[in-house]
Structure formats: structure tokens, C-alpha cells
Image: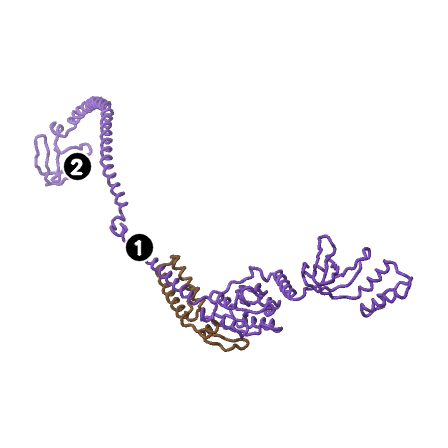
Amino acid sequence: MKLTDFSQQEPATPEGAFQKAAAQVEAGEDPLSVSDFLNSFNKAFKRFPFTILGEVSEVNAKPGYRAVYFTLKDASASLSCLMWNERYQRIGIPLAVGMLVEVKGRVSVYASKGRMNFDVESYSLAGEGNLRLQVDQLARKLQADGLMAPEKKRPLPTYPSTIGVVTSPRGAAVHDVLRTLRRRFPLAKVLVAGVPVEGPQAPEWLVYGLQMAAYNSAEVIIFGRGGGSFEDLMPFNDERVARAVATCPVPVVTGIGHEPDTTISDMVADLRASTPTAAAEAVAPSKEALGLNLSALGNRMTAAMERSLALHRTKLQRFALMPLFQEPGRLFDNEALTLDNLSDRLARALPAALGRDRQATEALQDRLVRCAALFSAPQKATLERTRVQLAALGTNLTRRFKAEAALNAARLEDLSPLSVLARGFSVARTQEGAVVSSVTQVSSGQALSILVTDGTIESTVAAIRPKTSAQEGAVK
Amino acid sequence: MTEQKPMEELSFREAMTQLEGIVSLLESNTLELEDSLKNYERGVALLASLQKRLTAADQQVQVLVGELSSLGSDAEQDTTLS
């Protein structure tokens, strides 16, 4: 038995391989075992990729299976297909009955059942379904990237001073937008980036238009076009455009096509309006509404001012009516009361205190008197006793002195010159009064007074005879 | 009052913001009477300026990219559309 290995023969086409296999069978060589045949078959046909277009008719994608099994059919034929799970998941578009798909893969036979399967490596959707699905896929991708997150949506500037418009320079849309802006908010400057919105170059132009508008300091950008077919709107579904919208430094408002049309640019925009005109209306505040708004602000301001004035006036009046300003004297009411009260208390306190003091003094006086009497009685007695004693003693004292005095008087009597004179003696005195007791005191002719008991004899010294020692004595 | 930029230099939005600020300030009734009056005066001037700008404005259109097809007047446009 000769085993033919087709894989080593490098046939150019599947047709060639079939022919070779057929030729081998016809040549009547040794038959192959079933296993050998199928192995050879699989080896051979693994080399030839096919692309098949068909409608999905049955899908069997149970969890736990390692592959998804489905059937592809057309009007008169059907083909069993399988797709390994990891490949299926990589595609990201779940297969559904009725889908028109293009599958790429190779033929293989499941040897144990002898059943032919088309081993699908990849598939894509065919026709417009394909286009819409691509859009859906991109939408999902961008959503996963967070480009559509609600928190990413920026608020529009209330009163934009510069508005960018990125749309086709031809057609009604741009004029609708410009007219709306002029009517509603002529204050804003409008920057128009007129770019092609259809055709293969459109996405690049749209991105450029957005960049230009943002670069020229538009504060908000109107981005859109008039109505068209799904294919016409495709540039707004372009990933580059969608990312340019999402990353635009200023808010973007889309108005693409008509109401039901929704593109990816709409989804990632900060605000989606149904038409270009609606986008312009969303961006520009209306002049009339603004005018009303301003009037309302003016009214509120005036009302607030009037309220404030009225309030101040009332406050002032209230102050003016305060008793303080009406009767300034009231200011000291409290003090006056206190003063009155104190003076009253003082008036009552003073006499009372005086009375009390007087009583006390009187009481003290009484007590003093009583005390004095008490003290003087024994002293008086002592005094009296002492006086009597003293009187008695006094008498005794003089008695002794009296006796002595009498004695002395008698002796004095005895010693008196008068008594001597009485006994016959005399005293001679000079004119000067000096007692002459010696002859030397006198001279002859000198006058002398001689005192005798019953008078004086005026005499003159006749002679002087000093006495001899034996006869010393008086002059007579 | 925080800013005292000359009124002509204020953008519409700035002037509007200032006016709204003044109105709320006055409505809050927290100001001295003198300041109230000063603010009121400024508010009235802002209001007049804004109203004047709104009525007198003539939209300025600048074409950055491409060429606009001829513009009819608003009336013309409106008749062609309707």
C-alpha cells in the first residue's frame, strides 16, 4: 500500500488536488483504509482556503462547547460549519440566523463520523447589513473606550462669543444654521469651516474642519450636514471623525441628517440635535428670550433695590420712634430710680442711726454716772479719814515747834542787845552805821551815835586812849 | 464688586455674569446701603449695555475653510425654503 501524501506535492489549486486524488483512485492502486483516506484528505484540503458567501440558518453555540456549530445555506444547498471558540470570540459579532455572511476557512472531515465541516477561521457581514454592523461594532468599541460616557458630555457655553460651524459650504444646511444664528444670537462671531461631507476624503476634511474651528477659538462647534442616505452619512460614522469629535477641546453639537438618523458622531458629541437648525438653536440663546431675561433681571434688581431702601427706611423710622430719641431723659431712667431708691434709704437710715446712737450714749452716760458714784463713796470716806488724821497730826506737829519757839524766844530775849542795853550797855556807831568795836575805827572829832536803851546820844570823840594789854575794854 | 473692568471690554457673557451676580447680591440684601446703591448703579449700566448690544448686534461671519455658496437675504432664504 502506498500512501500518497498530497501535502508534499504542492498542488496549485484545489481542483488540481481533486484531479490527482481521482487519478489515484482510477489507477486502481491498493485501496486506502478509511482513516488513511480521511487523514490524507484533511491534510490535502487544509492547504486551500475558501471564501464562501451564505446565509446563516442554524446556530449552535452552547456554553461548554469548544466550538460554535452553524449551517450556511443558499437557495439550494447547505454547509455545516464550525468555528473554534477563541476565533469566534475574536470576531466579536455574534452569529444569528438570517445573517448574510462571508466566511473564510478550510474544509475538514471529522474522521470518526466521516462528516465534513467547514472550519471557519473568520467571517464578516455582507451587504448593507455589513455596513450597519460595522457601525454598531465601532459604536460598541468607542463606548467601551468611554467616549460616550455621560460624564464626558460638557455643558455648552451660555453666551458663546464665537461659534464654529463645520459642514458643507453648499446646500441648505449651512444657510439654515447661519440664519438661525443670526436670528437668535447676532452677538456671536461665526466661524464657518466649509468642508466636503461625502466621499472618501470626507472624514479627513471633517476632522480638519473641527480642528480649524477649535484652533480659531470657537467656544462651541456646530457639526453636521443635511439629510442623506445611510451611506451618505457614513463619514460621520468614521472612527477618526468620532474620535475628533470626542477629543475636540470645545463642546461639539451635532445636527446630522434628519431626526431618526443617528451616527457615531452624534453619540460621542456633547449634545446631539436632530438637524443642523436644531443644533444652531441649541447653541445660540434666542435674542427674544435673552431680552426677556434681561428685563427680568432689571426688574429683579430694581425690586431688590427698592426692598433694600424700604427696609432701611423702616429701620430708620423705627429708630426715630424709639423712646430714646423721643425723650432722651429716658436714657437715665434706671439711674434715676436707683438714685431715688438710695436717697430714700439714706433718709430712712440716717435718723434711725442717730436715734440709735443717742440712746446708746444715754445708756452709757447712765452707766458712767452709776459707776462714778460707786467709785467715789469709799474714796470720800478714806479722804475724810485722812483729813481728820492729817488735822490731828498737824496740831501735834506745831505743838513741839511752839514749845521750842517759846524756849527760843526766851533765849532770844536773853541774847537781845536791847536787853543788854537795858542792863546799861551801849552801842557806838559811826555816821555810816558801823558798830565801833575798836579805837582804831575812830579819830578824834569824829561824830558817833551812841545807842542806849531808851534812845540815842549824838557825841563827838574827844580823845582816844588805846588800852594797855591789861586794860582792854569799852569806851564809855 | 470684584471686577471693575470698563464695561466695553467685558464680553457679553462676562457682563451677563456680572449682572446676574449683582442681582443676586442685591436680592441677598446683605450689603450696606451705599454698596447697594453702587451695585445698583453698575447693574443698571450693565443692563443698558447688554440690551444695546443685543439690539445693535450685526453678526460677523468668517469663513475658515471652503467657499460658501452665495447667501441670500433671510427673507429670500425663508421664501425659498417654504
Question: Which of the two residues, A349 or A33, is positioned nearer the viewer here?
Answer: A33
The answer to whether the residues at label 2 and label 1 have Cβ atoms under 8 Å apart is: no
The image position of residue B80, as x and y in percent, is: 48, 74
Residue A267 occupies quadrant: bottom right
Question: Which of the two residues, A209 or A15, is positioned nearer the viewer here?
Answer: A15
- Can the viewer see residue A294? yes
Q: Quadrant of the C terminus of chain A?
A: top left
- Can the viewer see residue A252? no
Task: Tell me the element at label 1.
Answer: helix
Q: Nearer the viewer, mark 2 or mark 1?
A: 1
Mark 2 to mark 1: distance in Å? 142 Å
Task: Tell me the element at label 2.
Answer: loop
- Which chain is the one coloured brown? B
Question: Which of the two residues, A444 or B38, is positioned nearer the viewer here?
Answer: B38
Question: Which of the two residues, A167 or B82, is positioned nearer the viewer here?
Answer: B82
Residue at point 68%, 58% (across, down)? A97
Q: To which residue does mark 1 refer?
A: A314
Q: To which residue does mark 2 refer?
A: A438
**A377 horizontally vs A306: left or right:** left
Q: Quadrant of the N terminus of chain A?
A: bottom right
Instruction: Give a yes or no on whether discs 2 and 1 share a subunit.
Output: yes
The image position of residue B55, as x and y in percent, is: 40, 70
- Which chain is the one coloured purple? A
User: Label 1: chain?
Assistant: A
Indicate the amino acid at tag 1. Answer: Thr
Residue B28 occupies quadrant: bottom left
State which tag comes first along the sequence, 2 or 1. 1
The image position of residue A278, as x and y in percent, is: 50, 66
Residue at the limit of the structure toward the front, as seen here: A76
